[in-house]
Image (spheres, grey):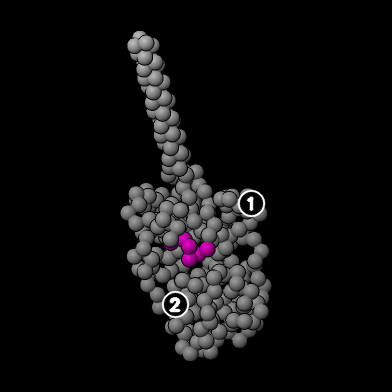
Amino acid sequence: MKKKLLVLIAGMMTVLILAACGSDDGKTGSSSNDNDQEKEESNVLRVGMEAGYPPFNWTQMDDGNGAVKIDGAAEYAGGYDVEIAKKVAEGLGKELVIVKMEWNGLVPAVQSGVVDAIIAGMSPTDERKESIDFTENYYTSDFVIVVKKGGPFEKAKTLEDFAKAKITSQLGTTNYDVIDQIPNVDKQTAMDDFNAMRVALKSGVIDGYVAERPEAVSSTAANKDFAYVELQKGFKTNPADTAVAIGVRKGSDLTDKMNEIIKGISEEERTKLMDAAIANQPAQ
């Protein structure tokens, strides 16, 4: 009886040891899978943008003119920002993934790690620098006002000429803030995106909207009823207000690496990329 009990105990110990080994193997496998996933994620650069601000970025239905597929969607993103994002991803040795989201969601997305970078025609203002870091500029522009061709403001030359005009721009941008510099302006509620502004301008709901020059060139090229006004004495701005840079998480090690890549893109190449973006933009 005693011998049988010892054999039974020995058998039970063997089962427990095997079970423990099996448990360790399972943990090892899980750790390996996690490492593989982390390795895969490290090879991806997730870039956030609106994909609705031509010529910087837009949405289209195919991969024409170098457009990149939007994550989780059937559409593709194209434009100047996409071309810059491709160069940055290539320089980092990573696969580019475009994440389309609303403008106001971009900064929180990079803060939380949903995206690795914002390449969306975003200016590195002092206010934004409190929340995220920025690279060196990859484009510099100035502000103009898009109006109706043949309308009462097409021949305007100064800010004073826009007195009583109904003017707006995009919510959460410096473009909207500078409207206050127009004397006696009828400042309209900020809009979510530039598509909404174009519709409002075409229908006469507004008299004009403030935009960066590339967007104005793009918009007037696509809409024969639009024109843009370059003011003789324009808006007073800080250099950061008209610059465009890549936004990253505070303290990100990507900043210095991206700066080196940006430095390698000559002004001539940047101009060519912007000219191509304006020429290739979809009809608005």
Determine whether label 1 and label 2 are within 8 Å by CB. Answer: no
Q: Is residue 162 magenta?
A: no
Residue 51 seen from this side: yes
| Location of residue 218 with respect to 38 vertically, above or below | below
Residue that numbered label 1 is attached to: 74
Of circles 1 and 2, the one toward us is 1
Residue that numbered label 2 is attached to: 177
Measuring from the top left, give residue 146's x and y in whole percent.
Answer: 57, 76
Measuring from the top left, give residue 122's x and y in whole percent.
Answer: 45, 63
| Location of residue 202 with respect to 14 vertically, above or below | below
Tell me where residue 282 sits by quadrant.
bottom right
Amino acid type, label 2 = Asp
Can you say which quadrant of the picture contains the N terminus?
A: top left
| Location of residue 91 with respect to 174 vertically, above or below | above
Element on which disc 2 rests: helix
> What range is drawn magenta here?
102-107
